[in-house]
């Protein structure tokens, strides 16, 4: 079982052909739409940078760090816009918090 605990391990995974293939399947399945925006009933709102609003990420619902066996499971993937992806992983700090690199 592969490990995805370090930055290097994750980067290697995200560059792999297996990931690129399943990622594409997830995008098609989700119609290239952010699932979180969709849940909120709005497709793209003003919190999305207009220049980046078309940028979509494919997110692991259960993080591969803790669930490496689900890394290539379509059911564990969802399409998120960059904004929501960052929000989920706490990469956008609230003003009083520091940038947190560990949680992503
Ligand atoms: Zn979104």
Image (spheres, helix red, strand yellow):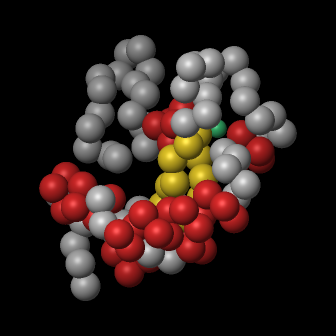
Please tell me which residue is depicted at 42% across the width and 63% down the height of the picture: 20
Q: Is residue 45 toward the left or the right of residue 77 in the image?
A: right
User: Residue 31 location in percent, x, y?
Assistant: 73, 55
In the image, residue 97 above or below residue 31: above
Q: Is residue 103 toward the left or the right of residue 60 in the image?
A: left
Please tell me which residue is depicted at 22% across the width and 73% down the height of the picture: 3
Q: Quadrant of the N terminus?
A: bottom left
Q: Is residue 22 toward the left or the right of residue 29 in the image?
A: left
User: Residue 77 location in percent, x, y?
Assistant: 55, 64
User: Residue 38 location in percent, x, y?
Assistant: 77, 45
Query: Hey, which residue is sitting farthest right in the picture?
Result: 41
**From this viewpoint, is residue 65 visible?**
no
Please tell me which residue is depicted at 35% across the width and 22% down the height of the picture: 97
Q: Is residue 17 toward the left or the right of residue 38 in the image?
A: left
**From this viewpoint, is residue 75 visible?**
yes
Image quarter for ligand 1: top right
Query: Hey, which residue is sitting farthest top in the picture?
Result: 95
Q: How many marks?
A: 0
């Amino acid at each position: 079982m592969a490990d995805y605990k370090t930055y290097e391990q994750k980067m290697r995974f995200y560059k792999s052909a297996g990931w690129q293939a399943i990622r594409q399947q997830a995008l098609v399945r989700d119609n290239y739409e952010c699932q979180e925006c969709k849940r909120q009933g709005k497709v793209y709102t003003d919190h999305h940078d207009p220049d980046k609003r078309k940028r979509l990420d494919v997110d692991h619902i259960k993080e591969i760090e803790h669930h490496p066996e689900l890394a290539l499971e379509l059911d564990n993937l969802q399409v998120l816009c960059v904004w929501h992806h960052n929000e989920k992983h706490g990469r956008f700090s609230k003003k009083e918090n520091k940038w947190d690199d560990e949680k992503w």
